Amino acid sequence: MCGIEDLKRALHTECAICCFGILALSVAIVYFLYYIIKDLYISSTIPTLKIDVTEAEKNDDLKSVLFKREEHTDKDIVPCYDPSTMQFLGNLPAMSTAEVKSIIQKSKVAAQEWRKSSFSARRKLLRILLKFIIENQETICRVSARDSGKPIIEAVVGEVVVTCEKIHWLINEGEKHLKPDERSAGIMAFYKKARVEYHPVGVIGAIVPFNYPFHNVLNPLTAALFSGNSIVIKVSEHASWSTGYYGRFIRAALAAAGAPANLVQF
């Protein structure tokens, strides 16, 4: 009889373990399907940006005159060329002090509006940017490589991949790190509470180098926008041409997200 009772208890325990395992697996499947369906739904609501692309931005083989430094001595223009081929890409106007002050003032106005935006609205903007980057990474890499003289593969790994990862992190983790943070007031002030709050500061200024034209623009830009600020970016005179393309899709993303038009300035 003892053997039969032991067998019954063993079977009962085994059945309980099996039921628990099935329940745990069912919960895991439900959560997995929930996140899959959620991601699919969110992806379906993200607009696709359509922007104009110039011949120099979309063609691998560029036919252009060679850049000659002695022909470009005007201090009011910024000459642009491909350092790897010395092909001339065009001239950009150098901003005056008055023009710089004007765009900063416009950025201040945009910042006052954007600081009131919800984290949901900010995530929407980043998702629009992320979708565009993924769908147009070939053009982004070509533009970056042409402006800086780097190989395409370096633009893929050093610019697109790291930028996408940064945006993905901000979408998933950014809000958590910007919420009020409870802190200890110390043993001598045990009867008090302390916390750190994070508020937008207004206009962020970013002076970025030439070596990673795309990532060096998007890295401070995404952080500034997600934290509720506007940003004015001063790119290197050695990598200015690419801002034409970047500026077009950034402005299109701002419009698609319903964000202020002057939130990002170059």
Image (tube, rainbow, N blue to C red):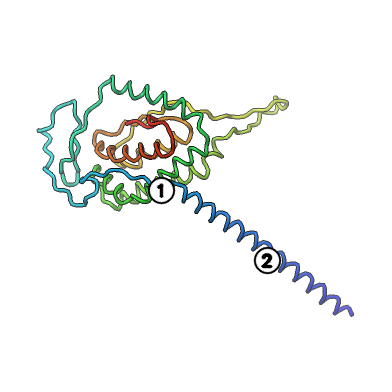
Kindly identify which residue carries mark 2.
22
Could you tell me which residue is drawn at 53 percent across and 43 percent down?
173
Write down the quadrant of residue 70 in the picture: top left
- Residue 209: % across, % down: 31, 36
**Residue type (three-letter) at the residue carrying disc 1:** Lys
The residue nearer to you, when weighing 105 against 82, is 105
Judge the density around disc 2: few (<14), some (14-19), many (≥20) Cα neighbours within 10 Å: few
Rendered position, 51 above or below 24: above
**Residue type (three-letter) at the residue carrying disc 2:** Ile
Q: Quadrant of the N terminus?
A: bottom right
Tally of numbered tags? 2
Labels 1 and 2: the sequence-earlier one: 2
Could you tell me which residue is drawn at 42 percent across and 38 percent down?
222
Rendered position, 263 above or below 57: above
Would residue 143 be found to the left or right of residue 178 on screen? left
Q: Residue 131: which numbered mark, if any?
A: 1
Would residue 13 be found to the left or right of residue 163 on screen? right
Q: Quadrant of the C terminus?
A: top left
- Residue 116: % across, % down: 51, 29
Could you tell me which residue is drawn at 19 percent across and 43 percent down?
83
At numbered mark 1, what does the secondary structure look like: helix, strand or loop? helix
Q: Residue 79: which numbered mark, if any?
A: none
At numbered mark 2, what does the secondary structure look like: helix, strand or loop? helix
The residue nearer to you, when weighing 66 against 254, is 254
- Residue 213: % across, % down: 30, 40
- Residue 121: % across, % down: 49, 38
Q: Are marks 1 and 2 in contact (CB under 8 Å)?
A: no
Rendered position, 33 above or below 149: below
- Nearer to us: label 1 or label 2: 1
The residue nearer to you, when weighing 119 against 148, is 119
